[in-house]
Image (tube, grey):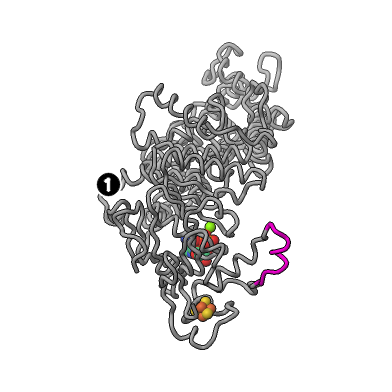
Amino acid sequence: MVKTSDSVEPSSVDTARIQLPYWLAGLLRHRLSVIGGSFILFVAFLAVFAPLLTGFEPTEVDPPNRFLRPSFEHLLGTDYLGRDQFTRLIYGARISMVVGIFSVVIASFIGVPLGLTAAHFGGWTDSAIMRFIDAKLSIPGLILAMMLLLMLGGGVLTVSIALGINLSSAQARLIRSQALSVKEREYFHAARAMGTSNWRLILLHMMPNSIQPVIVQASLGVGFAILGEASLSFLGLGVTPPTPTWGNMLSLAFQYMRSAPYLLFAPGVAILLLVMSFSFVGDGLRDVLDPRLKGKI
Amino acid sequence: MSMTTSTRSVLDIRDLQVHFPVNRGVLFIKNKGAVKAVDGVNLSIAPGETVGLVGESGSGKTTVGRAIIGLVKPTGGVIEFEGNNVLEMNSAALRQFRRQVGVVFQDPYGSLNPRMTAERIISEPLVAHHLFNSKQERRARVQELLEIVGLNAGMASRYPHEFSGGQRQRIGIARAIASDPTLIILDEPVSALDVSIQAQIINLLDELQDRLQIAYLFIAHDLSVVRHASDRVAVMYLGKLMEVAPRDAVYDNPLHPYTKALLSAVPVPDPEIEKKRERTILTGDIPSPTNPPSGCVFRTRCPIADEACAESIPELREVTPGQHVACLKV
Ligand SMILES: Nc1ncnc2c1ncn2[C@@H]1O[C@H](COP(=O)(O)OP(=O)(O)O)[C@@H](O)[C@H]1O
Ligand code: SF4
Ligand SMILES: [Mg+2]
């Protein structure tokens, strides 16, 4: 047996491990992330428990009581059909959150495999995939969304797919560039030299070491998708009314800006805060996960 | 050239060439010559033997190692492993070959996947080659390997960042020997370590060789590192071998001007000898391998070069028994 060993060099971490995963512990130390994260959880709570938090239905019309100012009965007033604005806001939170998260998940499920495949196989596979992505990028996002909506109709899923496809190019590019640098690392060479299969190379070596920026970008992307849904709603391309979304509430509010300006406030502020919250969390994740800022992983 | 008979060697490299194309222009790819990283190398390694491969940075040592393990495709020549041409192997033979050849890299930080535990890192070759198929067997093998390289079996669940540089290199060595190889390519395995740790790692490699009968190609950029480990030493410059000789011949009776120059850079322990010995100081930089000097590639830095050296290319010749030198003046 060989004698141990580098006793002069202490190993860096030895004693009891911290119970929290390091990224969560780091995130909790990042103040804006905590604020953003709390707001996201709050909105999620409202969305999940919406039926318990209000006595109205989101699509329940009450024409005599249209354009009511905020009051105890209608916390945020009523719209042009007399629908309770608070109810619509918390039900709308469901759609906005779901669209935001679905879009990013779809974007990652498309972008990550494409980017990893392009990086790993290189050559013409890489060129073909990247050309395809470039070609898709050259179609403006709105046109793409319109085409999909015409084909599939304006549901939550369609909107998420449209936004997801739009976001997927960025995810593919990002993970590809990370993966290309992983490919130059010696552990990757070592694995290749010992005959590790392509499948294992990609899943065990390439992906875990290139996924971090994708996660950061995904959390920023949620905010982008929520805004995207709102912009599509403005053009009548979002989730089909009467289903409430923050986007279509805002676009309706614009139409009645003169008679009921207060209607703009709630969906506007809600979108703003939620988008900001996701970007705070994204920034926090970036700081925590970025090895250059954090030192060696 | 016949240095050893190929039947007795683990590895036999003949006239190996690795030229990297230099491409310019995007639309119309024009071939603007090549980086001649390895240009006609002949080398063989006997079972259980250590061959030191030494030369300045940029001389092509890593590329030789990478060509052997299949990370770069040679543009010419033959690599024979136990008598079979690696470049013509079918996939089953290639699999077997990969099992029998290990590799240890220079950078103890870069050579271990930061997202894998020591156990998963070391069991990678076992998984790749379907050795020790049950989880328990594999775990037992990993623990055995950890102990063989001087670490604790209890460290198996740790991640690379929890180890010191020397310990990481031990993990890399454990991975390299896991599948019971007959040859290991050591690409500057101690260059990135503290001097105090270097000797420990070299001793470990020595002991492993005695125990497991592994042949080593030990790459280093200076002659001092491989002195004790090597049976033979090959000195490389700008893609070509300048001198290949038994260890003692290289250190006591170097014949090639480049070997002499490299030796001059190695301090001699005895201050008396150190004071008296004649020195060849290497000046200038190693020329670009894209555009190597005509004739002898070393001539631009050789203290005894003359016109003849620009005209003809010196071949490796056996000058004293076992000592091969590529110089027109020897
Ligand atoms: N993939 C590559 N593409 C182009 N040139 C390369 C590549 N790999 C190595 N080289 C060049 O080949 C030469 C030899 O490199 P290398 O084998 O790393 O030398 P050493 O290990 O002796 O320092 C260098 O000039 C290097 O720039
Ligand atoms: S051949 Fe000429 S240039 Fe080359 S090493 Fe010998 S003397 Fe020097
Ligand atoms: Mg090298």
Q: Say what amino acid the circle numbered 1 marks.
A: Ala
Q: Residue at x 70, y 27 (%)?
A: A28
Residue at the spot of label 1: B93
> Which is nearer the eye, A86 or B215?
B215
Based on the displayed image, in which of its 4 quarters is residue A54 positioned? top right
Based on the displayed image, in which of its 4 quarters is residue B300 positioned? bottom right
Q: Which residues are magenta?
A: B269-279
Instruction: Please say whether residue A68 is visible from this viewpoint.
Output: no
Asked if the stretch drawn in magenta spans residue B278, the answer is: yes
Residue A88: x and y, percent? 58, 23
> Which is nearer the eye, A206 or B102?
B102
- The total number of labels drawn is 1
Instruction: Please say whether residue A26 is visible from this viewpoint.
Output: yes
Element class at badge 1: helix
> Which is nearer the eye, A280 or A25?
A25
Residue A102: x and y, percent? 48, 32
